[in-house]
Every structure is written in C-alpha cells, then in structure tokens.
Image (spheres, rainbow, N blue to C red):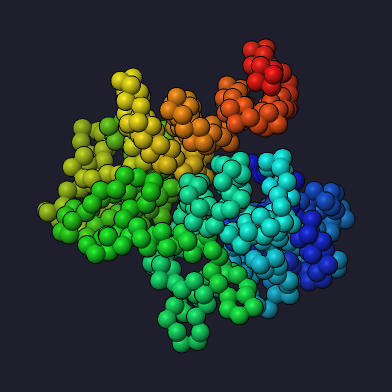
Amino acid sequence: MMESLHLFPQTDRLLDRIETLESPLVQLWGWPGSGKMAVLEALLARHGSRAVPLPLAAVASEEALREALESAHEVGVRWLVATGGPAGERLAEAERWLRPGQRLVFAGDRRRGPGAVSRDVIPPQELLLTSGEIASFWHVQTGLDLSPEVAEALLEATDGWYRPLCLALQATGGMGLTGAGPEEILEVASVRLFLRHEVMDAFPEEARALLLDAPKERPGSGSAGEDAWRLLDERGLWIEGSERDHMPRLLAAALERERVRRRPARSRATVSSPPSVAVVETPAGSRPVYVLGLLGSPIARERDEEGEHELDCRLRRSFLVLAFLASSPGLQAGREELIEAVWPNEGELTIERNFHPTLSHLRRALEGGRKGKDQPAPLLFRNGVYRLNPEVTWEIDVIELTRLADLGRQSASRDEMEIAADAWRQAWKLYRGPFLQGHYEAWVASRREEYQRLYLELLRELGDLYVRLGRNEEAMDAYRTVLVEDPLQERIHLAVMRLYAAQGRRDLVRRQYDNLCRLLLEELGVAPMPQTTRDYHRLMA
C-alpha cells in the first residue's frame, strides 16, 4: 500500500518541476526507493479529474493505447500518469496520439524509450531529498525537530536517498541516527536487506560480480572500473560532484560489506549464499546445493564448485510447482494437489496438455544439463507422489524460519534465554517479505498468512524476551517491526509505551497512544480497551 503522501517531502518540489516542462512525455528516472511512484500518486491527487492513471494494459497494443488516449481527451484530461511505467517501445506511439496540451508522465529505474521521442527527464539527482526535506521528514516521523547541522550530516551519510532513511527511522525512531554515517545506518537490518535485494539483486549475476570491483568515484577514461561504472550510469546510481562523481555512499558501504563477506569464499573458489537462507559450505567437486528464497521476492539458485547462478525457471507454473513442493510437509505433494494449486481453474484438456511439460521443464531447470549416474535426480516421482529429493541439499528459507522459531520456543521453555533470543533474531533476518511476493494464487495466500503469523508471533516473543533481558533498544526494534506489519496490535502499542516511559519520554508515550486511538478509530471504529487506557494514564502519571 502506498504510504501517506505527506511522508514524501520532495513531492511538491517535483510536481512543480514537472508542471514547468513542455514535452509531451515526462519520465521520472530514479533509483529504487527514491519516491518516484509517490510523486506520480501525488500528481494524480493534485490535478483531480484532469489527471487519470494509464494502466499497463493500455500500452499492450497500438489500438489499446490510442483508445485510452482518445478517451482521456474526450473528458478533458490533461495529465496521463502511467504508475507502472509503459514499455519503452510504445513511447513513440504514445506521443503520436497525445493531443496538444496533454502530458504523459511515467517512472522507471532506467532511462527508457527510443531517442527520437520528444520528452523531458527528471534525473535521479533531483529525486533525492535536500537537507531541509530531511528535517521535515524527521519531524513527521518522530515528532522532534532536527538541527540544520544534523540534517546536513544525514544528507552526507545517505545522499538524501528516501527509502533507506525511511527504513532506518522506522526501525530506530531516530535514536542513534543523529551522528550516524553510512556504516552505522547499514547496521539497521531493513536497510541492508533493501540494498541487497532491491538494489544489488536487480542487476544480473554477472553485473553484480562486476559491481564488487567498482571504484567509489567515477574513473577516468581508460581506467579500471569503467565497465562497472557503465552499469551505474545506466541506472543513474551516482552522485553529481564538482570534481568527480561518486557512488551513493550507502551503496558503496554495502558493496564493501559484500566484498568482506565474500572474501573467504573466494579464496576457496566458492561464493556465499544470500542471507535469506542458512549457509552450507560446498567443497569443490561436491553435489550442488539448491537455494530457495520464498519469503519476499522469490529466489531460486544453485550453488556448486563454480559458484552460484540462477535456476532457469522462466515458466511461471514450473516455479510455482517448485515453490509448492518446497513449502509442503515432507517437500512432497500428489498430482491432484499440484493441479489444484497450479491449474485451479483450467479444464481437463488444458491440464493434460500442460502438466507433464511443466514438470519436465522444472526437472531440466534443476538438473541444469548435468544428468548423470553420479548426480541424484533433484525431482522424484514415486507411487503417485512428486517429491524434492532428500538426498540433495536444499536450503529453503521457510523451513529454516520454522525451525528457528521452534528452537527459540524450546530454548525459552528451558530458560535458555540467550539461545532463544539468538534463534529468533536469526529467524527475523530470514523474513524478507510476504511469502511469494507478487503471486496471488489461493494456496499462496493461505501459506502467506501462515508464515506472516509465525513471523509476528516470534517477533512479539522476541520483544518480550529482550525486555526481560534488559535489552530495551532491541525490544523496541522488534515491537516496531510488528507494528509495521500489523499496526492494530494494541498490546504491542502498549509495550512500546512502556519502553518510552522507561526512558522518561512521556511525550512519546502520548504520541504512541494518540496514534493507537487514531488507527483503531479509522480502521475499526472503536476506542482502545479500558485496560490499555488505564495503563496509559498510569504511565503518564
């Protein structure tokens, strides 16, 4: 869900900029998490009936595009806003059918469209927050004022990159950030995960390896690192400088961490696995390890003595079969279960035509051309049941999440508090987002709810455990993460109030209680429970 527009202090500045441009097409070219989609939402809100969203279906063909633009003209629409970003090859056609005075605005992580198209581009540098906007954003998030000197220091540390700053504030409430540099901000887990999965993982595998050797500053012509900087140029991931352009400081710090993390693995000619799963060393000549990250944006990789590479799961249904098996008890399912999950609304003829080719494609993707007597088959079919071969090593984040949650509970029941806290903390790091993000099948929704419930339960238990251990800052992090996922949990709001009261911050206790009252009224039409209100007044006394 789009965050409230008042949380994006750069929107008015950028809207004013867009409205001064005269080209029929305007592109917001920004980094991941720079707030460009919020600007498009704000443009629609500002212009009301004179602005309409342009769905992706409208650029699927010339006929659909022309019909959508003509319909907009008939009702007096001036601004067409493609919130999903139309395909580059359709941009010239969009310009052809736009009427005088109409503007099409879209966003993207790369500069798109053929060079012949008349358009203006708002570059990544303009989407970054200024020090004044950082101070405004800080006040909205924390209720506290930020001095110009500290705002300037945060701008220096983050380059004004919206999403990392937002994640850091949500995780800490501003505590510990006023003197932080890039390395300290990277200590926030959600910031690290954002940079790794939404920024670095957006590059192909070969490009990611190249980025690790990129210098922090733009190299001169003919110098080492030019190829890596071409990748940064393509996505605008650099900061304009008076002397020499430099890489975003947070990205540079994240890449340095990745270099350090991989350094021992490189000496053994292997590559470490992503943080979404447990790491298993793979000695040269051993069997491959299959790495499946099903929490958040899906990951399907294979690691062997030559390194790590993506599995060829281009067919959506073959990946769904893999994900269904990987998240099923015993890593197995019968034919009817697979059909009900992957082909729920198809007729028998369609299923018969597609079932076995889909399984064959998955089998080929897993085997990767290595089928032979010395390698066990990753996918088995016995007695009517399909199963991921237990003789093969599988690293599956949802299984590890469940194991660590159970380990934490068992350790806590034996009063082994530090062991429980460590297990739950590891489980927390595994959760990169909702199960199979971007997929909406019925079975996915059911399992998504199950894993989210498990995740929130272990975070609640971890927060309570940290309070018992006197680790209040870490407890606050756990509680705040719960509220990001489920802001209506009254007990967690009260736990946060107690922590603020322990700091002597009655102003923050009041703000947390007011926020709880507002959420309950807006979402459920109710007031807090009487016990919560009594506890609040006791904390304020």
Q: Is residue 217 visible?
A: yes
Pick whichever, 406 or 44, lies toward us. Answer: 406
Q: Is residue 283 above or below residue 395?
A: below
- Is residue 516 rendered to the left or right of residue 351? right
Q: Residue at x 61, y 44 (%)?
A: 174
The quarter of the displayed image where residue 277 is located: top left
Pick whichever, 386 or 16, lies toward us. Answer: 16
Name the quarter where the C terminus is drawn: top right
Q: Is residue 413 above or below residue 348?
A: above
The quarter of the displayed image where residue 513 is located: top right
Q: Residue at x 27, y 44 (%)?
A: 394
Farthest-out residue, left = 373
Q: Residue at x 41, y 41 (%)?
A: 430
x and y percentages locating residue 490 in the rendered image: 61, 22
x and y percentages locating residue 189 in the rendered image: 48, 46
Q: Is residue 334 visible?
A: no
x and y percentages locating residue 476 in the rendered image: 54, 34
The quarter of the displayed image where residue 107 is located: bottom right
Q: Is residue 318 above or below residue 121?
A: above
- Is residue 89 rendered to the left or right of residue 468? right
x and y percentages locating residue 331 in the rendered image: 29, 35
Q: Residue at x 39, y 59 (%)?
A: 258
Q: Is residue 42 above or below residue 31?
A: above
Name the quarter where the N terminus is drawn: top right
